[in-house]
Image: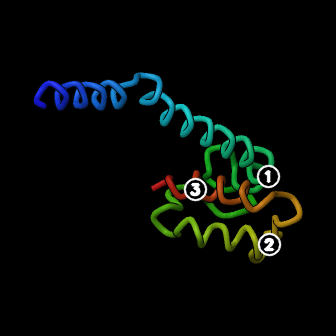
Amino acid sequence: MVYLFLILCFAVVSACSDPGSMEAAPNALAQADEQAASLYKKHCLSCHAADLSGLVGPSLEQVGTRMTEEQIVDIMNDGAPGMPSFTKMMSKDEMEAVAGWLSKNE
């Protein structure tokens, strides 16, 4: 019985320590951030600058301390004074990706 328990524990530890599974999460996050940054460059950079400092639009530096991801999505959906709605330019998933990326700027 003890022998069976040890084999089971070894199997669980081996499955949990798969290096491929541990690398998958950071790679997925990096790809999501890369996609969001690309969308930002395509749709937002001209008004908010490459460094988020703002040009025509306000600064988005440390926007994560001022707004939640949901609030950012709402502004992207509804627009704001001087800012159009992005519902015809970006999908909901794309807006959520950009908002998530921006909300990390604290």
Q: Counting other residues with Cα less than 10 Å from the Cα at mark 2, is it few (<14), some (14-19), or many (20 or more)?
A: few
Instruction: Say how the picture is coloured.
Output: rainbow
Q: In this view, does 38 lie to the left or right of 71?
A: right
Secondary structure category for the residue under label 3: helix
What amino acid is found at the position of numbered circle 2 in the picture? Gly
Q: Where is residue 17 in the image (x, y as percent from the top left)?
A: 34, 26
Residue occupying the point 54% across, 31% down: 27
In space, the residues marked 2 and 1 are separated at their CA atoms by 14 Å
Front residue of 28 and 11: 11
Dots 2, 1 in contact, CB < 8 A: no
Residue under numbered circle 3 = 100
Q: Counting other residues with Cα less than 10 Å from the Cα at mark 1, is it few (<14), some (14-19), or many (20 or more)?
A: some
Where, by quadrant of the figure, is residue 14 drawn?
top left
Q: In this view, does 100 lie to the left or right of 4?
A: right
In space, the residues marked 3 and 1 are separated at their CA atoms by 15 Å
Q: Counting other residues with Cα less than 10 Å from the Cα at mark 3, is it few (<14), some (14-19), or many (20 or more)?
A: many
What amino acid is found at the position of numbered circle 1 in the picture? His
Where, by quadrant of the figure, is residue 2 drawn?
top left
Residue under numbered circle 1 = 43
Q: In this view, does 71 lie to the left or right of 80?
A: left
Q: Position of residue 55 (x, y in %)?
A: 71, 56
| In front: label 3 or label 1 | 3
Residue occupying the point 14% across, 24% down: 3
Instruction: Give the numbered dot on residue 82.
Output: 2
Mark positioned earlier in the residue sequence (3 or 1) = 1
Q: In this view, does 63 lie above or below 85?
A: above
In space, the residues marked 2 and 3 are separated at their CA atoms by 22 Å
Front residue of 83 and 2: 2
